Image (cartoon, rainbow, N blue to C red):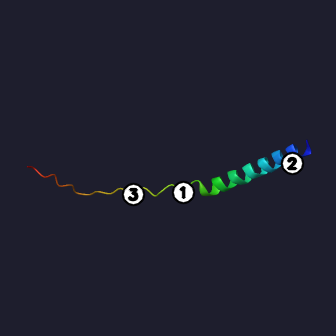
Amino acid sequence: MRYILRGLIYLVLLGAVALVVYAYVGDLSPRQEEMILPVTIGTD
């Protein structure tokens, strides 16, 4: 029983660390910029 409780505590701590890392690194959204590119359409 002691090993199961110790394993659950380790999993909870690992989950908390993963949540903190995701909070810092997970918001790496790219910068959005407006781009205007001319497009030529061939008329055959």
Q: Tag 1, which secondary structure?
A: loop
30 on left or right of 11: left
Say left or right for 31 vs 24.
left
Give the amino acid at mark 1: Leu
Residue beneath label 3, please? 33
Q: Position of residue 4 (x, y in %)?
A: 86, 43
Callouts 3 and 1 close, C-beta under 8 Å: no
Q: CA distance from mark 1 to mark 2?
A: 34 Å
Label pair 1/2, CB-CB below 8 angstroms: no
Residue 24 horizontal side relative to residue 11, left or right = left
Q: Amino acid at mark 2?
A: Arg
Residue under the point 59% across and 54% down: 26
**Taking 8 as reference, is 18 left or right?**
left
Q: CA distance from mark 3 to mark 1?
A: 15 Å
What label sits on residue 6 in the rendered view? Answer: 2
On the image, numbered disc 1 is attached to which residue?
28
Q: How many marks?
A: 3
**Which amino acid, by three-letter code, is at mark 3?**
Glu
